[in-house]
Image (cartoon, grey):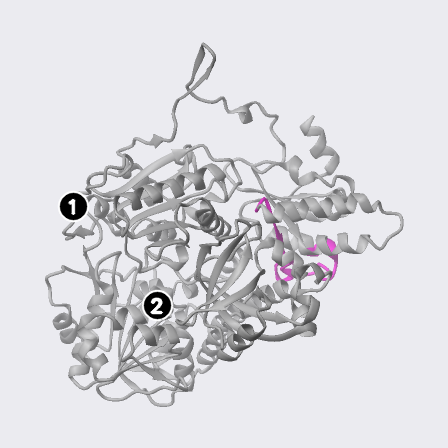
């Protein structure tokens, strides 16, 4: 077999430990450092609105939260309400010693304030008791990291440990095959999918469906659910997100059952119940299969039902967002239903995991992560692909179709775009806008201003246009949201404008989409699945904004073909010429000379890979402004152990405290401006025989996380250099590095 049960458990346990370790790293970090990095923010409570929204006032020069992100709200006693009094306390100790009360929280919206130095933040999901206390005392509240979803992984571990379950055995204990069994029947929009499925389900218990962007997956699943309910069947629809479940139940095919109170949902929130007042809660989140009733549950809860199930409870299980399921979750669905329909898209984003790619590759765990793709490739279940997209124009479908063997067909009623904005293609689909972007900068001022101006231009044509501004990176999205509040003519980010990371918008449909690719860590923005999701959201036009030299970078073949097809091998750029006049003298600036071509080549740099500097403690002691000397073109990582050692050096009498303070200020500035980031050690990456408690080895383990790229350890420690070279990691001493710059 491909994987033993111990293999599954090893992956799930590693992911569980990684999530726990990452959370521990966050909460054990100084609270003030987390605030500077944007992992903690503080706000003064202003008021509670009638709809349950709480309003807080936050300083604009702080790292504002991203919209639609989850937090833990903490009310600290006495003077600890002010972050200036947090001192050396970690976030965990601050909460342990000074927290009076706390609540889960969701950042729902951002808005301008009457005071120019502040903005307003709208918070939902606050407990009633916490809200009452805030109304009474009007305190300052700190918002920090939310708890990770560990129970989901623990449920899956229990499921893979159960070797006696016959229905999960056929999924988990499969034999490796070189044959790709994915050969779906193409289904057009005018075909009766329910009839096709009913026929196949008479002789098969499982069916796979691929739904490319805009092909009506949710509509089809709502229609199927309604048909099954009319037959008196018990049905479970499970998905990764609550939003996917809500979108399904809003479809008109399910209205009669909603009105009859025959649809229940786990963890029903106040907001959901106000939007759908006839949707019934499942108060204790218990498995509630009943003939003629539809149950809605996320993977986190349905996995618990599967873990505890002795008998199969539901007649039918429909797994929506199946491509977001880990492979053991695919197996878990077999314990919940007699008939299973999996629907997803292998060419969109797989589940997000924190375990590093190097670890996943080392143990060959990729097929466990990409569960739906594994299912479709290995098994010969009846399979279908929805080939007609209602969302994309013909031109848009031709571009996105590159990811689907050119089998995607447009049936959209909209084929021509009426916008007068120059960069919009009249036939819809994508346009590439190239501009000069500084290497390594995830929050370039000029690009962000251009994005905001483009959004305002679209809204000036039609104020109700639905717009998405997407990027791979959270710092990028956070900065765009912040600058939209500060620069835009709008007082807040409108409901019809979404500024989000790509991994949070699968299933989203908008009129226009702006996909921003910063000139930093490009390989992540150009990953095929992520790129496909980002560029297939818009009914009208998608605008891709990136560095003008993007086509010269490494990328997967489908992504390159998409970019070429989007502009017929031609690219437009912002501001190709500029006129400068002084008195009677006028000069046309035709372009710029790239001075980097005249720089001395650094011997540690490797072309074609991301070059990542990892700085040792001794370097900061001897050169506190080393980050500036490296420059913003390259990624700079500060191991957590280095920050700890710098902190301890303050206690030594023979160390220049001014140097340490300068180094600390420069590090804080680099963190706040996203020029650098902190990384914790991953001692599991160290070879056998290395002392996992040794500071040098912990720094080495940070470099090993990036072994696929070109990690560069900058150190004057000869022993650390020797160890690094033994592991094939590039090193350079501070003396040699500075000599190159002369």
Q: Which residue is mark 1?
A: 415
Circle 1 packing at 10 Å, graded few (<14), some (14-19), many (20+), is some
Tell which circle, 1 or 2, labels the residue nearer the N-terminal end. 2
Residue 231, given in percent of the width and then of the height, sits at 15, 84
* Position of the N terminus by quadrant: bottom left
Residue 96, given in percent of the width and then of the height, sits at 67, 74
Q: Residue at x 20, y 55 (%)?
A: 389
Residue 560 image-quadrant placement: top left
Q: Is residue 236 left or right of residue 441?
A: left
Tell me the magenta residue range: 674-698
| Residue 306 on the magenta segment | no
Q: Is residue 193 left or right of residue 650?
A: left
Q: Is residue 269 visible?
A: yes
Q: Residue furthest front?
A: 114
Q: Secondary structure at mark 1?
A: loop
| Residue 679 on the magenta segment | yes
Circle 2 packing at 10 Å, graded few (<14), some (14-19), many (20+), is few
Q: Residue at x 25, y 47 (%)?
A: 462
Q: Residue at x 89, y 51 (%)?
A: 653
Camera-nearest residue between 74 and 167? 74
Q: Which residue is mark 2?
A: 243
Q: Is residue 145 left or right of residue 512?
A: right
Camera-nearest residue between 274 and 560? 274
């Amino acid at each position: 077999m491909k994987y033993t049960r111990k293999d599954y458990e090893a992956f799930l346990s590693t992911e569980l430990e990684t999530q726990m370790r990452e959370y521990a790293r966050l909460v054990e970090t100084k609270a003030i450092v987390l605030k500077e990095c944007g992992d903690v923010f503080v706000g003064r409570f202003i008021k509670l609105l009638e709809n349950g929204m709480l309003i807080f006032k936050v300083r604009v020069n702080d790292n504002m939260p991203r919209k639609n992100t989850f937090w833990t709200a903490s009310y600290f006693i006495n003077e600890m309400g002010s972050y200036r009094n947090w001192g050396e306390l970690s976030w965990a100790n601050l909460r342990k010693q000074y927290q009076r009360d706390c609540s889960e929280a969701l950042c729902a919206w951002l808005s301008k304030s009457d005071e120019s130095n502040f903005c307003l933040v709208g918070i939902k999901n606050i407990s009633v008791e916490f809200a009452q206390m805030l109304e009474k005392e009007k305190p300052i509240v700190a918002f920090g990291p939310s708890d990770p979803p560990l129970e989901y992984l623990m449920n899956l571990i229990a499921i893979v440990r159960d070797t006696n379950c016959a229905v999960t055995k056929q999924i988990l204990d499969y034999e490796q095959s070189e044959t790709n069994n994915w050969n779906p029947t193409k289904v057009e929009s005018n075909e009766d999918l329910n009839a096709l499925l009913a026929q196949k389900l008479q002789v098969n218990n499982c069916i796979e469906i691929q739904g490319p962007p805009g092909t009506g997956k949710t509509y089809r699943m709502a229609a199927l659910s309604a048909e099954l309910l009319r037959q008196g069947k018990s049905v479970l629809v499970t998905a990764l997100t609550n939003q996917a479940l809500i979108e399904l139940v809003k479809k008109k095919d399910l209205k009669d059952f909603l009105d009859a109170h025959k649809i229940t949902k786990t963890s029903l929130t106040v907001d959901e119940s106000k939007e759908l007042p006839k949707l019934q809660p499942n108060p204790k989140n218990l498995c509630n299969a009943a003939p003629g009733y539809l149950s809605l549950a996320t993977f986190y809860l349905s996995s618990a039902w599967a873990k505890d199930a002795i008998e199969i409870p539901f007649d039918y299980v429909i797994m929506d967002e199946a491509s977001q399921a880990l492979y053991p979750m695919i197996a878990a669905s077999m314990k919940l239903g007699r008939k299973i329909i999996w629907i997803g898209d292998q060419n969109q984003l797989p589940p997000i995991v924190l375990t590093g790619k190097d670890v996943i590759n080392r143990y060959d765990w990729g097929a466990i992560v990409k569960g739906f793709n594994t299912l479709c490739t290995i098994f010969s279940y009846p399979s279908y692909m929805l080939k007609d997209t209602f969302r994309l124009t013909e031109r848009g479908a031709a571009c996105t179709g590159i990811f689907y063997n050119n089998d995607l067909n447009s049936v959209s009623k909209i084929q021509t775009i009426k916008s007068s904005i120059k960069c919009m293609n009249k036939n819809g689909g994508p346009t590439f806008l190239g501009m000069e972007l500084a290497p390594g900068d995830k929050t370039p001022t000029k690009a962000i201003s251009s994005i905001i101006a483009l959004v305002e231009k679209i809204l000036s044509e039609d104020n109700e246009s639905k717009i998405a501004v997407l990027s791979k990176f959270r710092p990028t999205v956070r900065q765009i949201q912040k600058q939209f509040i500060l620069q835009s003519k709008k007082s807040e980010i409108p409901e019809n404008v979404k500024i989000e990371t790509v991994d949070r918008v699968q299933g989203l449909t908008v009129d226009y989409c702006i996909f921003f690719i910063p000139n930093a860590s490009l390989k992540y923005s150009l990953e095929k699945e992520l790129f496909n999701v980002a560029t297939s959201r818009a009914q009208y036009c998608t605008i891709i904004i990136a560095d003008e030299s993007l086509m010269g970078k490494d990328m997967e073949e489908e992504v390159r073909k998409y970019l070429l097809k989007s502009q017929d091998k031609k690219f437009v750029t912002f501001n190709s010429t500029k006129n400068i006049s002084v008195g009677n003298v006028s000069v046309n600036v035709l372009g710029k000379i790239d001075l980097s071509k005249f720089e001395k080549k650094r011997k540690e740099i490797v072309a074609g890979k991301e070059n990542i500097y990892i700085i040792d403690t001794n370097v900061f002691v001897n050169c506190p402004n080393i980050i500036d000397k490296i420059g913003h073109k390259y990624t700079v990582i500060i191991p957590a152990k280095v920050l700890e050692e710098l902190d301890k050096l303050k206690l030594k009498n023979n160390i220049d405290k001014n140097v340490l303070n300068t180094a600390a200020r420069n590090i804080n500035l680099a963190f706040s401006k996203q020029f650098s980031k902190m990384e914790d050690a991953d001692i599991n990456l160290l070879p056998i025989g290395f002392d996992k408690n040794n500071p040098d080895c912990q720094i080495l383990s940070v470099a090993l996380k990036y072994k696929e790229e070109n990690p560069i350890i900058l150190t004057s420690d000869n022993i650390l250099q020797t160890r690094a070279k033994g592991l094939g990691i590039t090193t350079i001493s501070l003396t040699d590095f500075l000599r190159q710059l002369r």
